[in-house]
Image (cartoon, rainbow, N blue to C red):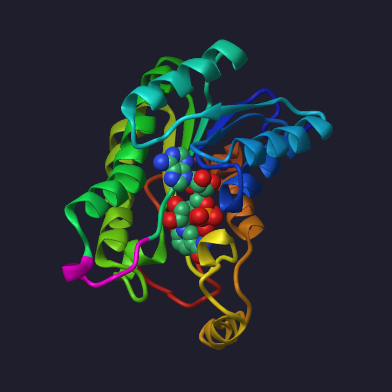
Amino acid sequence: MGKLEGKNAIVTGSSYGIGKAIAVLFAKAGASVVVNYSKSEEKALNVVSEITSIGSKAIAVKADVSKSIDVKNMVNTCVETFGTIDILVNNAGILAFGTIEEISDEFLEEVLAVNYKGTFYCCRETVPIMKKKRYGKIVNISSIAGQRGDHASAPCYGSSKGAMSVLTKSLARQLGPFGINVNAIAPHAIITPMMDYWDEKKRDQMKETIPIRRLGTPEDVAYTALFLVSDEASFITGQIINLNGGYLMDS
Ligand SMILES: NC(=O)c1ccc[n+]([C@@H]2O[C@H](COP(=O)([O-])OP(=O)(O)OC[C@H]3O[C@@H](n4cnc5c(N)ncnc54)[C@H](O)[C@@H]3O)[C@@H](O)[C@H]2O)c1
């Protein structure tokens, strides 16, 4: 029997990248999964097929997490289909580049809306259900940029992720008494479509800065998320787990 047998999970932005790896690993562990996407329906349906072919349940649900009405509908669909929600992974995110002078009002709003408000909305919709059951696991996919500030990305990206990390701690305090664990993962240098802008030379340079001497994989993040949502991790809450091959060793 898998670790997550009988559990129902929503993984936002899970049609590709880190979210896909989390959705598939949770399904392998026995969970039923909502594969959320905002634009890439075909990819989301492929993830659903992959999950059903391994004997678990999944549905693809279109929702732009930056829109609270979409989030409400997604959570309702999860409850109508699977009966309840036990696990929420806030993974959907967008990266940003540029100096502060180059960031327009509209772009700032978009980055904060997807990375921070989306996480807030998803938590706001699922928490009442989890509170009633006195059981829930929330994992937020933050970033190293939210820990130490932006290096290559634009300053609005790191601050959106920093806000996500503080939200993680605030919710962990509020929800611990209700049996709900809230943690975040702060990855660095994970090879996904988000990192397509790195060419081979840049990737080799990055490896040299990482003590483990390799880049991360979506599965590295997925295994960490699986541990955090497992009952074995029930005494861990309010933590931001650095996942970076040793590149950053404090917060
Ligand atoms: N790849 C890395 O090195 C790295 C490092 C630190 C943090 N992260 C974070 O990990 C998460 C996943 O990143 P990734 O590397 O897989 O990126 P990615 O670009 O490959 O995937 C992002 C996912 O988010 C979805 N998404 C974007 N906007 C959305 C919206 N409005 N509503 C719903 N879904 C939306 C996309 O469709 C996609 O599935 C992001 O939050 C990212 O900030 C990634």
Residue drawn 43% across the image and 74% down it: 249
Depth check: 45 or 77 in front? 45
Residue drawn 75% across the image and 35% down it: 51
Q: Write the start and end of the magenta stretch as one range.
A: 96-102
Q: How many marks?
A: 0
Residue drawn 33% across the image and 55% down it: 161
Whether residue 216 is visible to the viewer of this picture, yes or no, is yes
Query: Where does residue 138 sit, x and y in percent of width and height?
Result: 45, 37
Depth check: 92 or 198 in front? 198
Query: Where does residue 196 sit, x and y in percent of width and height?
Result: 55, 67
Query: Where does residue 12 sit, x and y in percent of width and height?
Result: 50, 38
Against 159, residue 203 (above or below) is below
Depth check: 94 or 102 in front? 102
Against 133, residue 118 (above or below) is below
Q: Quadrant of the C terminus?
A: bottom left
Query: Where does residue 185 sit, x and y in percent of width and height?
Result: 46, 55
Residue drawn 60% across the image and 39% down it: 230
Q: Classify residue 212 as left or right of residue 101.
A: right
Quarter of the image where one finds residue 41: top right
Is residue 197 located in the magenta-colored stretch of the structure?
no
Is residue 100 located in the magenta-colored stretch of the structure?
yes
Q: Classify residue 127 as left or right of residue 84.
A: left
Whether residue 2 is visible to the viewer of this picture, yes or no, is no
Against 12, residue 134 (above or below) is above
Depth check: 131 or 193 in front? 193
Quarter of the image where one finds residue 171: top left
Q: Classify residue 87 as left or right of residue 120.
A: right
Q: Quadrant of the N terminus?
A: top right
